[in-house]
Every structure is written in structure tokens, then in C-alpha cells.
Amino acid sequence: MAKKSYTLIVVPDHESPVKRYRVQKSLFLQVGGGLLLLAGLALGATLHYFQVARDAAENRILREENLTLRGQLKSVRERIEHIGSTLDRVERFDQKLRAITLLSDPQRNLAMGPVEQEPGVGSPAAETAFTELASMESPKALTGKLDRLSAEATRQEQSLHELQAYFQDQKSLLASTPSLWPTRGWVTSDFGSRLDPYTADRVMHAGMDIAAPHGKDVFAPSDGTVVFAGLEGGYGNVIVIDHGYGIKTRYGHLAKILVKAGDRVKRGGLIAAVGNTGRSTGPHLHYEVRVNGIPQNPRKFILEE
């Protein structure tokens, strides 16, 4: 069978002869197939270009989001550290308030009386918080830490609400607790066992001796009622104040007594002057605090520095 072909006739201008060209049909098919192939390749290249461009745009957006998240993560870590240190301070303040109010907290083994921490030592909860903070790397760990801090803050809030209720119920007790220095000077003899300056025997010293200039003012450390004002043996001129709730304070070796039995005194009120009366080696104030008749260390009641 003869191959099919097409004849292409070219008619030039002027008097040039007509030219005829015979083209096989298969060549047309080959050229058409080539053009279709080129069109397909061009289409594929175009689609690939747009895909790459879209991926590049998405990658740029992801990089920007990643930088933003890194900044937010750093900010969250700083906030966690700040919250942890704040909770640490609240914990210590909570302990101090409980010590001042003689309020126990079995959950944290806080007993009656003041609690002093060694310098540089924070609460166990805060130390654990900072240890975990140092090892946190993932948002999941941050979320867990935030949950723990939230639980700790809730517990602290409950504890402070308890203290608030206690303060409201015990306002008169707080007003009656001797918390000020009765006078300013040098503590020459603290509470506890000591050598008697006259006999050199070891005896129990039931109070605190504060050396001060003769005539220096003596103030009431809290509200109360004067139950004794006069001479009392080796203590010379003495004042005894009943603050209620079983708490009494005693002031000895006074030069002058400015109150009398039955007087009501307020915290910071002037009651006497430092002296050297009675059995004394020099001008000083003998200061005692007794709770239900039992001598207590006056230092644990003094809140002033």
C-alpha cells in the first residue's frame, strides 16, 4: 500500500514557477506528537514550579512561626522562673506568718514558734521548680510545669486564706503579743543558762539584759494592763504587764516608773526609764516574757530588726 502523503503547493509572486512539495502523513504525525510532548513537558514544568514556589512560601512561613514560637517559649520560661521565685518568697512569708501567729501547718511540718531558714536555702518546692526548669526543652514539659505551678499557687492561696481568717479571728491576740524592742541598746546577756555575775555559779537567766544609757526610754512592746509597778527584791523597780492570753512581760532595774497598776498601755507607749536599781552591775533593762508563767526567749517574739 502506497504511503499516504500531502502535497504542498507554493505559488510565488510574479512569474516564478509554482513549486510543489510532497510531505508524508507520518511526518505530520511525528511533528504533532513532538509538539504535544513539548506541551506536556512545559505544563509539567510549570506545575512543578508553582509547587516549589508554594512549598518555599510555606517553608518561609514555618520558619517565621518557628522563630516566633522560640521567642514565646523563652518568654514562658522566664515567666515560669519568675513565678517559681515568687512562690518561693510567698512560701517563706507564709512560714514566717505562721511562726508569728503560732499557727501550725502539719502539711509542711510547720510547728509552733518561729522558723528560721539558713541563708541561701529556699523552699524545697522552689528548688525542685528551678531544677525542672533547667531541664525543660519541650512545650509538653512546660505545660506540665505550669500545671504544677498552678497547683502550688492554689495551695498557697488556700494557705494564705487560712492565715487571713486566723488573723481576723485573732486580732486581739496579735495586738497583745509583745513584738517590739522595749528599748534599744546592747544585749549583754541573752535568755538561757549563764554565769551569775556575782556568784560565778551557772544559773538560768529567765530573760534578756539590754544595756542602755541611764534614763533611756522603755516602751510597752504590745497592748496590755499593768498588774504590778514597784520594788521587787534584786530586780529593783519593776513593772509587770499582763497582755492577755496568758502572756506577761516584766521589766526590771528601772530608774523611773511612769505607770501604775491598773493602767492600760498601748503598743509603743512610754512606761519607764532604764536604770540601775536592785542587784545590777550597770544601767540596763532586764526584760522577760512569760507564757502561762513559763519563761520564754524574748527574741522569738520580737519582729523588729
Image (tube, rainbow, N blue to C red):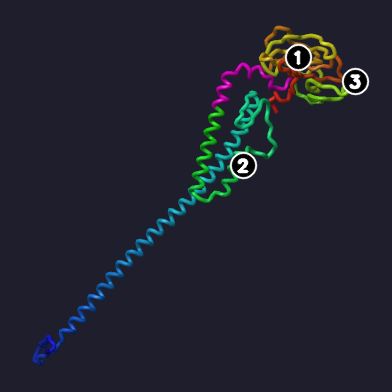
Question: Dot 2 corresponds to which residue?
Answer: 127
Disc 1: CA contacts within 10 A as few (<14), some (14-19) or many (>=20): many
Task: Tell me where residue 186 appears, x and y as whole percent.
Answer: 79, 26
What amino acid is labelled 3 in the image?
Tyr
Q: Which residues are magenta?
A: 161-182
Residue at x 70%, y 7% (from the top left corner): 262
Q: Main secondary structure of the magenta part?
A: helix
Please, which residue is most extreme toward the left here? 15
Examine the rendered structure and indicate whether residue 143 appears above or below residue 10: above
Q: Quadrant of residue 106?
A: top right
Decide: few, some or many residues near mark 2? Use Cα within 10 Å; few <14, some 14-19, many ≥20: some
Q: Quadrant of the C terminus?
A: top right
Name the residue carrying label 1. 272
* Residue 231: percent from left, percent from top: 81, 9
Instruction: Assign a secondary structure to mark 3.
Output: loop
Q: Which residue is mark 3?
A: 198
Judge the density around disc 3: few (<14), some (14-19), many (≥20) Cα neighbours within 10 Å.
few
Identify the element where label 2 is drawn. Answer: helix
Q: Measured along the vertical axis of the image, is residue 225 above or below residue 106? A: above
